[in-house]
Amino acid sequence: MASETIPVARYEGNGKCRFCVWAPIRNAVELHIVSAQERFITLDRDDRGYYSATATDVHPGDLYFYRLDREEEFPDPASRFQPQGVHGPSQVMSSEYAWKNDAWRGIPLKEYILYELHVGSFTPEGTFDGVEKRVAELRDLGVTALEIMPVAQFPGERNWGYDGVYPFAVQNSYGGPEGLKRLVDACHGAGLAAVLDVVYNHLGPEGSYLSKFGPYFTSRYHTPWGDAVNFDGPYSDEVRRYFIQNALYWLEEFRFDALRLDAIHGILDFSAKPFLEELSSAVHDLRERTNRHIYLIAECDRNDSRVTLPGACGGYGIDAQWNDDFHHALHVLLTSENQGYYADFGSLTHMAKAYREGFVYSGQYSIFRQRSHGIPSTMLTGEQLVVCSQNHDQVGNRLLGDRLTSLVPEDALRLAAGAVILSPFIPLLFMGEEYGEKAPFQYFVSHSDPDLVRAVREGRKMEFEAFRWQGECPDPQSQAIFQTAQLTPSLKEAAPHDKMYAYYRKLIDLRKTVQSLADLDKESMEVTEYEAQNVLVLRRWALDDEVIEILHFSASSSSITLQIPSGTWNTILDSGDPVWGGHGISLDDEFISR
Amino acid sequence: MASETIPVARYEGNGKCRFCVWAPIRNAVELHIVSAQERFITLDRDDRGYYSATATDVHPGDLYFYRLDREEEFPDPASRFQPQGVHGPSQVMSSEYAWKNDAWRGIPLKEYILYELHVGSFTPEGTFDGVEKRVAELRDLGVTALEIMPVAQFPGERNWGYDGVYPFAVQNSYGGPEGLKRLVDACHGAGLAAVLDVVYNHLGPEGSYLSKFGPYFTSRYHTPWGDAVNFDGPYSDEVRRYFIQNALYWLEEFRFDALRLDAIHGILDFSAKPFLEELSSAVHDLRERTNRHIYLIAECDRNDSRVTLPGACGGYGIDAQWNDDFHHALHVLLTSENQGYYADFGSLTHMAKAYREGFVYSGQYSIFRQRSHGIPSTMLTGEQLVVCSQNHDQVGNRLLGDRLTSLVPEDALRLAAGAVILSPFIPLLFMGEEYGEKAPFQYFVSHSDPDLVRAVREGRKMEFEAFRWQGECPDPQSQAIFQTAQLTPSLKEAAPHDKMYAYYRKLIDLRKTVQSLADLDKESMEVTEYEAQNVLVLRRWALDDEVIEILHFSASSSSITLQIPSGTWNTILDSGDPVWGGHGISLDDEFISR
């Protein structure tokens, strides 16, 4: 086997296409070209179980299956397109695309201001083209990176994306590979980085035929989704290669600037050289080779700083990771909710620690987890941690998918936005929050298997038990649930949304233009808690300027005495200002500290 | 809960005993004192599920069970003694013991020369007292550390020890806790370190009632022994404490100098702060506190240098680990076996790499494992790696438990001994190899459950399939199999064993007295391969001396030209010398290199 075998069909032009599929548990694999001109081509096996052949008179748009052991046939595990959905044939695709913004090299991680969106519900079209039309608007908002929820082909037309079963195929109902390339191209044209959410911890429950080809999964470990992906057992070299090639595919062929790795705590891998380390090496090699700003950002539930430490320090070398503790600390200060994982939060000290260090749980006992949790993140830089006040999970994994807009008053929304955008971390906004969108974002699927639909319904109910939410669990399979998730971006033209939108733009502008806010340096920061007054004060400084951020987590007014360097301080933003929809200015224009 | 809760019954003297047991899944726990005077005492529960009480009029020797939810009763999971075996009551034990060698502080790790023994088969008595009588002899051999195979109470009277089900109870048939203390004391009196093999990756299949008390196990991960020990799920703080207390118990109360951690690759733990890191911290704290030489030595199948790297480098901070690759490389050079995991070895280059670096597989593809294996161990020092030419697993996990003596001629045995003892690593001898013992060491058990006996028989057969050994698989349950494992140490008085024994003594003496052999420094070493001649040459140097080791892996004579520093070199050992049983001296007394 050539160590560079790439198990993805590659159209080479002039009617030639190189087919390659890994099927070590099969004795014979044939390519079944279904159309335009039906025929069977026998593939050759190598010593690692890759089957391949170069076929002629094959053209982009042709459809095919792989026939296994002459008895059954399935779509290509590395299909680039499933025009008829997860159960249909795979389509030969050309990689060609005329990039308009060919000179784009990305932007540094510390400049990332992420905007997470779900293609299906972001616009009425529910397509990449729909999103593309709004790229200019997002640029005007000021965000710098579009984070697109997973687009790997999933069953049906409605799905968050985490049920994808063809990691290389772009969802047909979103507009397929070409639509996605146009969107990425448009982002680059607008100066925005494009980030793709990818799922390497499991495959969806419907339409996954990988196990027919090889040991992609192992029963040695269990995950919430069943058998774990086989990252460390026999044959795991090839399973790893499949996913590493997938990452490179999005970064190279689609020119994504970064990947968001879904729930890496679901990647169960005890090898001496973990898959994630290998993945980050491969991506960093690509970065070196192309001189592009390319990043990996992980979601991880372990509060493990090693995720983002270099290999030499025992880490995976991933560039940044989500810090859910920040969200939870903030959410509970705003809502006083205390069920489920929110039981572990609720004090100003938690929020202060999230600013000072990152992880709130760095070894303390967690009531929710019934065990000690995490290790310190003090050694991580600000740009290694992504924070938010809302995201698809924190909104969508509520019984009714209610956004913060449904939970807290507007002044608390402005506080939340400031706390996130003016933090020394990478901020992430969830589509619509910038104008106070109210549409709930609930969990939705459109599976075709009735047993599965029933199982998903039951699973959702179980998940909500820890939270003891009141009310009926909405039906994930319902078309109506998906409809209610549709955004109404025109809202931002009208009161009170217009003021919220202006406020978000202002915050983002401040983050970009004030040096001490742009610097993501936890060392040039001092966090002071005023417990009795529910006030947190962040002092941040840079070479040329210095700011004080006063976060007041209470509806009633408080008085504090600031301990700040002497000099004259100007108010640059007051979230209570009526111009943003507030009840009144509470700060003077100018302070003099002696 | 006091963070110092110790879930072990502790006799405090004067008829007072503190009972404490962790049973978070139970609503009521009573102490049932069975004898001398039967009664029930209700225990108080704390917020982590520890139940405890101080009982009076209780004395060492009293027997007890814990009664759970007033419906069923079981022995103490942290029983210190099971005088009637795994299913019987637990016994109250006093920790008192009059240590004769109270000033002992241990020896540095680099001075360790390990001698692994199995208490049951090492002497006809099969007890600690039996071993104690032979301590002086072992001191005379020159080994410096006795490594005792596990002694935690197992079912029946015959077992390697890896089926223990009471990690705190010393096997009754071996002589119980007092016998073990006398043995450790005798070791210290003879200047020998005492090392205990402990098993934290599973509990045996018969007589384990831990699950009746709490979630000690988890179905999230599978191990060859069934559900994994719960080191990272809910309640894992308390499970960890149980095992950490166990380690401290052996090191403090029994004064063991080191623990050998069995198969840590079976400890499946994805937490940010792994159990093994916590364990090594606790043990190192004890080392600091007591100023004793205390060590942890791990067996690990992952070829992962992080096991022995400090926490700051992402490691577990364990002091040393077994390097099975050294064994396999050596074994295959000697025997030409190529089945099972031996398929991955066979060249002189493998052996050379084992000397130069440690792990032979440091990322290469392993045919046996069907995946790439390991990471480099170049940064590990010699004293961080334990090597052997035989051990209980490598001998015992053969179909017929045959030792090297049954597989290769005597000159190869002498070569193997030299390769191990004169290596820059910690050497380990397996009981009896020093005089060429021939008794096979086969797998034996004495379970009482017929289904289990059947399962063990089947399991053994399966294990041997990869090796395709010829012949019937011996019955592990048979008393005769155990009998054949009995050593005959008197052999060493008679030819040819006497010469082999003298040779081992000589090797050990050289290792201790020649500085360049005593220094475990891979940097002061040069390894040269003479592929055509099957010769490996190690040059090792220290401040005051320098040695050349010539390892000739061939039965026919070879001629090589040494590239060595100029000067006069004296032959200090020739394994072909008839004085050791060889066929003739092949080296001059003196070499002059120009």
Image (cartoon, coloured by chain):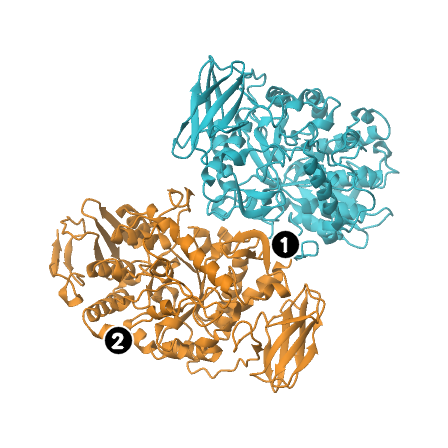
Chain colours: A cyan, B orange
In the shown orientation, is residue B315 left or right of residue A533? left
Tell me which amino acid carries mark 2.
Ser
Tell me the SS state at disc 2. helix
In this rendering, does residue A566 appear at all? no
Residue ID for mark 2: B490
Image coordinates of residue B197 in percent, x first then y, are 44, 66
Cβ–Cβ under 8 Å for marks 1 and 2: no
**Considering the image in quadrants, where does the N terminus of chain A appear?**
top left
Tell me the SS state at disc 1. loop
Tell me which amino acid carries mark 1.
His
- Circle 1 packing at 10 Å, graded few (<14), some (14-19), many (20+), is many
Residue B516's place in the image compared with A21, above or below, is: below
Q: Please tell me if label 1 and label 2 are on a single chain.
A: no
Give the residue displayed 52% in from the left and 60% down from the top. B202
Which of these two is toward me, B538 or B18?
Answer: B18
Residue B147, numbered label: none
Q: CA distance from mark 1 to mark 2?
A: 56 Å
In this rendering, does residue B183 appear at all? yes
In the shown orientation, is residue A578 left or right of residue B331? right
Residue ID for mark 1: A373
